[in-house]
Image (spheres, grey):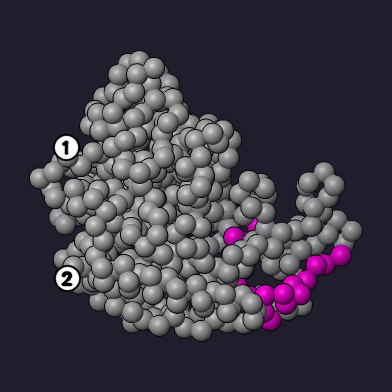
Amino acid sequence: MAMVPAAALAAEADSCSCAEACCAPSPQCRGPVDTSAFAGTAAAAAECPKLLLWQPELQFPLRVGAGPRLGTSLEAHAPTGLGRRRRLGRCHPAGVIAVGVFAALVGAVVVTGYRAGVRPSRVPAIALTVHPVRRVAIVGATHGNELTGAWVVRRILHAPDLVQRPSFEAWEAMLGNPRAYQETRRFVDEDLNRQFLSEALSNLALPGYEAQRAKALAAQFGPKAKGDCKDTAACDFLVDLHTTTTAMGITLIAEPWSPVGVAAACWCQQRLRPRTEAGDLPEVRVMLESLDKQSSPHLISVAREGLMIEIGPVPQGVLKADACRWMEITTSAVMDFLHSLNTGTDLDLPPKAHVFRDIGIKIPAPLSEDGKPAAMFHEAFEGKDFQPLRKGEPMFLGVDGKIICYDGSYGDVIWPCFVNEAAYYLPQSGLGFGVTLHEEIEVPAVTTS
């Protein structure tokens, strides 16, 4: 079967009419994708229909945007300059060193907090010089039954000013998992937001729709960087839109390898606080994951920088007007931050921020022999996301009527998240509620070169 140059696919993708939702513009499937244009990404070797960048039967584009398509061959858009430089893999030396130091400091704090079971120390502030954010992606429906993100993608199609900013050269808004979205399922075979480990992306033999979809997304927005050099990714900043069935309000989830993501989350928390105090928005929180870039299985890790927006409570497969509005406002605030970072105007980063640091632990309810829960969340614990859970307080109520209390394994006080999340009844997504520690950090002082 003939190979299709990746650049050709990207340049013409908007005219795709393949009944199998192929990424190629031809009415017929044009075969596997030639990934040589992606400069080192072992991606998208699966058959073209499995990439699903377009679903005509859904009656709206899964990708909308302005300027050159993210992930296309650089030579096709050489006048912009940025793409050519990034594809050559040139890194800002100060940025590489600073990002490495920042991630190392964050990692050290996480290990200390986890092992000692105590509140972590503060993360020291560090000045970081980064490249401007010129190419931005907004992805909804990475989980197909989380309809709010897909709604925001459609809103962007009708109102591009939600994300377009003068300092951006290109942006895209698209569905992450269109097949699962069409079926209103979290995933088809496996959780897509667990498929972006480097080893998984390089393993072309992995079966399943999501394993192949992840490779297509990594080819489009990446490649996922190895080592300290992150400047090879086609996408400068990726925002992944999610909802939860739990009472997490508006939660901006950042990872320590992305100092711009951490700064964006803290800036948005500060910027949106007056609307929370006025009762227009729920509480805005920042959650900091404990993952380095190579250990992150999440979609955002294929881009140079990124963060996730989590809105809740929202039932699966349901659109709620308030949640859609909250997500739209938060997404637009992230775009405002990126534009301020690019231009150096109205940046006003807070010097410190209160965050909830995920220590990488989940506490599941006991299971019966059939794999189903042998206990449910205790009513005193329901809805207590980001509220202190102290040693000896109830977590679960067993079928035998016994109360299971927190035993202090991760410190005398923890701050749970995703408390009774419906998706976490699925082993593929990870059972149980998350454990965070509440701390104050110094916000990374990012500026552009």
Q: State the residue in front, 247 or 95.
A: 95
Q: Is residue 413 magenta?
A: yes
Report the span colored magenta: 402-420
Where residue 112 sits: x, y (%)? Answer: 58, 79
Quadrant position of residue 64? top left
Amino acid, disc 1:
Ala
Quadrant position of residue 94? bottom left
Question: Nearer the N terminus, badge 2 or badge 1?
Answer: 1
Amino acid, disc 2:
Thr
Q: State the residue in front, 66 or 386.
A: 66
Measuring 48% from the left and 31% from the top, which residue is drawn there?
179
Q: Secondary structure at mark 1?
A: helix
Q: Secondary structure at mark 2?
A: loop
Residue behind mark 2: 345
Query: Residue 404's mark?
Result: none
Where residue 217 sits: x, y (%)? Answer: 39, 41
Residue behind mark 1: 76
Quadrant position of residue 309? bottom left
The mark tally for this picture is: 2
Q: Quadrant of the N terminus?
A: top left
Q: Is residue 372 left or right of residue 118?
A: right
Q: Is residue 424 left or right of residue 81?
A: right
Q: Is residue 322 magenta?
A: no
Measuring 33% from the left and 59% from the top, which residue is drawn there?
229
Structural distance between the alpha carbons of marks 2 and 1: 32 Å
